[in-house]
Amino acid sequence: MTKRRLSALAATASLAIATTTFAAEQPPLPLVTDRVYLGPARLVDIGGRHLNLYCRGKGSPVVIFDAGMNDSTIAWARVQPEISKTHMTCSYDRAGLGYSDASDRPSTSGNDVDDIHKALQVAHIKPPYLLVGHSAAGMAVRVFADRDRDEVVGMVSVDGSHEDQTRKAKEREALEAKELPQQAHHDAEPQPDCVAAAKSGSIPKSSPAFEPCVGTMYEGVDQAITDATLAGTASLKWQKAFASEMANFDTVSADETRATRRDFGDMPIIMLTHAPIPARKGTPQSIQDRRTVDWEQLHNEVAAMSTHGTNWIVPRSTHSINYDRPEIVIDAIDLALEIAAKQARQAHATATK
């Protein structure tokens, strides 16, 4: 996910998305150099179009990674290799993003789940699954777990979105406007029409729309992968898919998530929440702290949907916990797998008595 994408999501829906870097506090991580990100890993036919599926490792449950809004398999480059040492893992590009074909359907959480479920079936990758979603995909994994409860043994949501975050943000903005009337009419910087900018098939690098529409890459990714990813992001196919994700985020996708169950029994649900952040210039820290508490409470709400639910506040992290603190994401997945394995052993012991 590029910096521009993080900012767009924060502006439209989030309460306290952190985009501040903590580079001075974090030791450098190894450069991401895996050549698999330079092209499709495996194109799976899901009925007249193809989904790019990147699977590696062996062992059950299978860990399924869904990237954040407008992101691709590169989102999991610091996490998937480690988990694949003990389990089969699969990341994928949603329709129109990365190396997956475009779809004539809207880019919603429900359609995302339809696509990956069909791809897993076609690829003969059998359940049980542990689902991992970043940002907007935090809603999609809940839709998946609700629709196919018997196939899912756990969820890890990496600073995942919530179906009510837009409403909460608007309520908070109304209160803040009364407290800080001088900021009530502050207009966000206008964004270009990125689909129109890509009408020739791709946004030219010389275009003034290139930087705001395409943005920059995660830190710590080598130049070849960076160039390939940004070139893909500039394409008309990708820009249309992202525009559809944005258009459906707080409408159809939010409604689909809102319609899911509120009780997942004892399924492990681990929420990861970015660290509290300092207020921007001109905003009192007390207001920023309230935004942070609201964001944490939304995650607590999801964690409470399971007797094995928990919310971890991740220090020295931004919204991109998958790149800032991949070791924490790995720990969360390992714990969810450990709980799921214990539950499976207990269920087996009970069944054989």
Image (cartoon, helix red, strand yellow):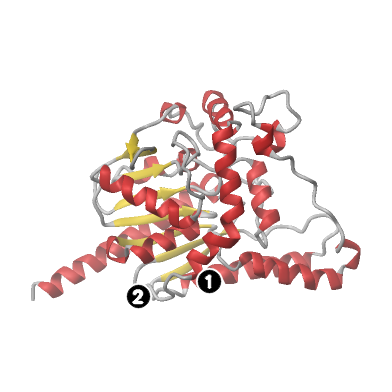
Residue located 31% across and 55% down the image: 129
Q: Which badge, 2 or 1, comes first in the chain's sequence?
A: 2
Relative to residue 288, is residue 64 depicted above or below? above
Residue lying farthest right?
Answer: 182
Number of residues whose C-alpha sits closer than 10 Å to that of mark 2, classed few (under 14), some (14–19) or many (20 or more): few
- Residue at (19, 71) in percent of width and height: 347
132 sits to left or right of 313 = left
- The answer to whether 295 is drawn above or below residue 187 in the figure is below
Q: Which mark is residue 265?
A: 2
Q: Mark 2 falls on what kind of element?
A: loop
Horizontal and vertical percent position of residue 97 = 50, 39
The answer, for residue 313, to whether it is visible in the render is no
How many angstroms separate mark 2 from mark 1 (CA)?
Answer: 16 Å
Q: Which residue is mark 1?
A: 300
Q: Residue 19: x percent and y percent?
A: 67, 49
* Residue 73 can be seen in this image: yes
Q: Secondary structure at mark 1?
A: helix
Nearest to the observer: residue 173 or residue 198: 198
Which callout, 2 or 1, points to the residue nearer the camera? 2
146 to 224, vertically: above or below: below
> Which quarter of the figure has residue 267?
bottom left
Observer-nearest residue: 273 or 22? 273
Neighbourhood count class around disc 1 (C-alpha, 10 Å): few under 14, some 14–19, many 20 upward? some
**Closer-to-camera residue (27/107):** 107
The amino acid marked with disc number 2 is Gly
